[in-house]
Amino acid sequence: MSTADERRWFAAVASLEECVLCGRVGVQVAHSNQDRGMGQKSPPSATAALCPMCHHDIDNGSSLPQDERRRLMDRAIVRTHIRLAALGKLKVAA
């Protein structure tokens, strides 16, 4: 079960209308799978706003090597954080 803070994070990521990798409209909140076992999810901050195609390519893409999929996910997470900050949805607490 997720906490209220986690739900707010996921809602903020889902509010981004365009994929942070390709720009397609319509996103999913995609979790990083790095260093995770079956059925385990990464922390909310390790999620990205991805379209279904990019999400699939990173999670299940047999056409991309694993290191490339990880690099793309890392880039997507950083871009998600940048967009959320630009929109005032990601703030640093003192």
Image: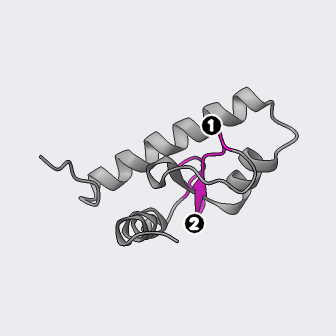
The Cα–Cα distance between marks 1 and 2, rounded to whole angstroms, is 18 Å
Residue 80, image x, y percentages: 44, 50
- Residue 23 shown left or right of residue 4 in the figure: right
Judge depth for marks 1 and 2 and give the one in front. 1
Q: Quadrant of residue 69?
A: top right
Residue 37, image x, y percentages: 72, 45
Q: Kindly state the secondary structure of the residue where label 1 is placed.
A: helix
At a point 22% along the width and 53% down the height, the residue shown is 91
Residue 72, image x, y percentages: 62, 37
- Residue 87 shown left or right of residue 17 in the figure: left
Residue, disc 1: 72
Residue, disc 2: 25
Residue 20 counted in the magenta span: yes
The foreground one among 75 and 11 is: 11
Q: Kindly state the secondary structure of the residue where label 2 is placed.
A: loop
Residue 11 counted in the magenta span: no
Magenta residues, start to end: 19-36
